[in-house]
Amino acid sequence: MNFLHKTNFISLGLIILLMWSCKKKDFCEDINTAAPAIEVNALKDYLTTNGISATEDSRGFFYIIRNAGTDEKPTICSRVTVQYAGRLVDGTLFDTTSSATFLLSDLISGWQEGIPLIKKGGSITLYLPPTLGYGSATHGSIPGSSILIFNLDLKEVE
């Protein structure tokens, strides 16, 4: 076998190895990030003060399922298409779109944990403490340590 063939053979082997390693189960395992009690209590105070009745998740976020949806439920490895609006607790709209597609594993923890609570066609409102959002860092127009509120409609699951 000449040098060029050996190089191609080795390159092909590396590509196959890389593709196989990306499909390993641990690449797509669910995360289990939990918010600290101080953030959960601040979020509870906000909900109580504003008369919002939401379900508490053990990881520290709250949610209201407006429509459970049908068909398939996304997993951390799913590509999802959503319509959403994100607000701060003072009502400031910081982001909105009628259609955006993402790999769920690339999104903030609160979305990774909250979106799989609904199925395709479903709608949910997520109330996220900072740890499950952008943490203490400022992110664009979102101040650090912000509680985030997202109204999400799950349009597609791939």
Image: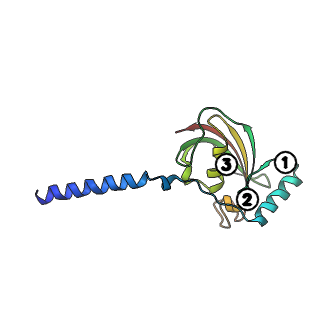
**Mark 1 or mark 3, which is nearer the start of the sequence?**
1
- Find disc 3 in the rendering and name its residue: 114
- Hey, which quadrant is residue 81 in on the image? top right
10 Å crowding of disc 2: few (<14), some (14-19), many (20+): many
Q: Which residue type carries mark 2?
A: Pro
Q: In the current view of this chain or complex, which residue is farthest to the left?
A: 2
Q: Which residue type carries mark 3?
A: Gly
Q: Is residue 96 above or below residue 69?
A: below
Question: Disc 1 and disc 2: Cα gap in Å?
Answer: 15 Å
Mark 2 or 3: the one toward you:
3
Q: Are marks 3 and 1 in contact (CB under 8 Å)?
A: no
Residue 129 - label = 2
> Residue at left 21%, top 55%?
9
Indicate the position of residue 121 as horizontal and vertical percent values: 64, 34
Question: Disc 3 and disc 1: Cα gap in Å?
Answer: 18 Å
10 Å crowding of disc 3: few (<14), some (14-19), many (20+): many
- Find disc 1 in the rendering and name its residue: 52
Circle 2 sits in a helix, a strand or a loop, which is it?
Answer: loop
